[in-house]
Amino acid sequence: MEDKIIVAVDGMGGDNAPYEIVKGCIEAVRLQPNIHVKLVGPEELMRSELQKFDGNKENIEIVNATEVISCDEAPVNAIRRKKDSTIVVGCNLVKKGEADAFLSAGSTGAILVGGQLIVGRIKGVERPPIGTMFPTAKGVSLLVDSGANVDARASHLVQFAKMGSIYFGNTMGVEKPRVAIVNIGLEEEKGNQLVKETYPLLKECKDINFIGSIEAREIPNGYADVIVCEGFVGNVILKLYEGTTKALIGIVKKSFHSSLKSKIGGLLVKPALKSTLKKLMADEYGSAPLLGLNGLVLKTHGSATAKEVKNSLLQALDFKKQKINEKIKETITINDSLEEL
């Protein structure tokens, strides 16, 4: 089938592995038969986990990997030393063309290193960023980079903007996504050295719909579709956003149990409230792709549940269907060719 995708899944990555990971794979292939999973992990353990679930498992095969890279290991050393780890085996499946994508909830650093060193970058891409979708008042926005590159140059941010615009535009069906750079004010002359160097380059970039700067307080309002920054700033924004959302949901839930009146009111608004709060949960948005690689590498939360794994696999299928990598490759290659003239 044209839209079929083979995804290598790290069966041992994350806090809830292997049970939630395997469960998410089962749910995804039940929902979408075009997804074929290569479950990477210790063969006997993976087989034992699969037996816990009923139903057809023809679209799930086990790929043996005897080692696991923990989050406290140095990523580069771990990737080089643990050749039979789930992350290395999974990335190699993508490199060899035996899988279209690799999904893991494991060590972020190891996934980033494995993606770059094993899968490799698209020619012309200087630094692959992580692109993370998150909820806003107007729907969703894309934060890029959300943690892959804590230091970056202006040319990197320009590429982040181009790749993010392609990814968001195609997956969300937006013809000209609004692109903004994170800043401490709206005026062009404001910002640190990196922002001041990047701003004029983004203004001149014909591949994107650049609308200027965005302050952090306006991010939740959805004033931009693609939000560009280096990974240090992006990761701080993302984690503050997730923490604040979790705290607010907890406060709202607690308030409905504060008195008899509030409990009655809570019961009346529960259906609408549940639907609203659902849109704020991270597991609704799948995982974050490492943009600009020769194959798709997806990083999901370390605390990922089956629902997030399932949504990540559906996201991978859409990524392939929309030919995101091919479009990034085409855009970056054309721009490089023009610069050489």
Image (cartoon, rainbow, N blue to C red):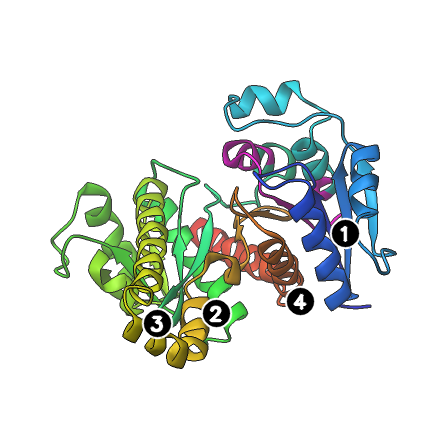
Residue 56 x, y percent position in the rendering: 86, 60
Q: Amino acid at mark 2?
A: Gly
Residue identified by numbered label 1: 37
Q: Amino acid at mark 1?
A: Val
Which of the 4 image quadrants contains residue 262?
bottom left
Q: Are marks 3 and 2 in contact (CB under 8 Å)?
A: no
Q: Nearer the viewer, residue 146 or 247?
A: 247
Q: Which label's residue is closer to the chain start, 3 or 2?
A: 2
Q: Which label's residue is closer to the chain start, 2 or 1?
A: 1
Residue identified by numbered label 2: 169
Q: Nearer the viewer, residue 19 or 79?
A: 19
Secondary element at tag 3: helix
Q: Are marks 2 and 1 in contact (CB under 8 Å)?
A: no
Residue 321: numbered disc: 4
Q: Amino acid at mark 3?
A: Lys
Residue 263: numbered disc: 3
257 lies left or right of 47:
left
Q: Nearer the viewer, mark 1 or mark 3?
A: 3
The answer to whether residue 93 is visible is yes
